[in-house]
Amino acid sequence: MHAEPPPPHRPRRQTVTGVPRPVRRPPGHAPARSEISEQTTLGHTYVRSLMRSQLRAALRTLGALALLVGSLPPLFALPRALEGTARSSEPFVWAALGVGVHPVIWLLARWYVRRAERNERDFTGLVEGRSTA
């Protein structure tokens, strides 16, 4: 009887493990955008944050406008109270509206639009993953 030679010895496979590397996201990947489009709780929080900041700007503007318009009746009564006559105060009223009130309303509107645009720009930067400084 003749004995067969043993089969050739194969080296055993080894698994090499290392420290896990951070996953690189493809350019343009925005985690907040996917949270918003998937309507997750975090996405809802992002949108509510934008809505709150826009509401805060609107309420500030409305409050300033209410103070301005609310101060008009006493301002219009001022010339009659100072002079003590029933003389017409139309020139004073027109001057107060034209020089005092309308420019202030214009400035309030301009401030509100700039603030709303800044809020939206900050929100877009957050959603796209850019830093807004």
Image (cartoon, grey):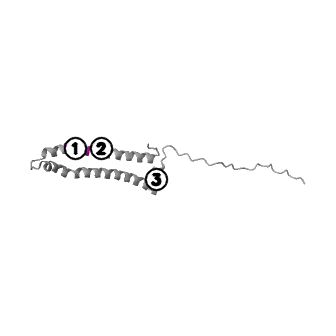
Q: Secondary structure at mark 3?
A: helix
Q: Secondary structure at mark 1?
A: helix
Magenta region: 98-108
Q: Is residue 113 left or right of residue 43?
A: left
Please say whether residue 104 is one of the residues in the magenta stretch: yes
Q: Quadrant of the C terminus?
A: top left
The amino acid type of the residue labelled 1 equals Gly
Residue position for label 3: 35
Residue position for label 1: 100
Chain-order first, disc 1 or disc 2: 1
> Crowdedness of circle 2 by 10 Å Cα count: few (<14), some, many (20+)?
few
Question: Could one spot residue 40 in this view of the protein?
Answer: no
Residue 16 image position (x, y, % from top left): 69, 48
Q: Which residue ends up furthest to the bottom in the rendered image?
A: 41
Question: Could one spot residue 57 in this view of the protein?
Answer: yes
Chain-order first, disc 2 or disc 3: 3
Residue at horizontal 48%, vertical 50%? 31
The amino acid type of the residue labelled 2 equals Arg
Looking at this view, is 57 or 43 the one in front?
57
Q: Is residue 99 left or right of residue 45?
A: left
Residue position for label 2: 110
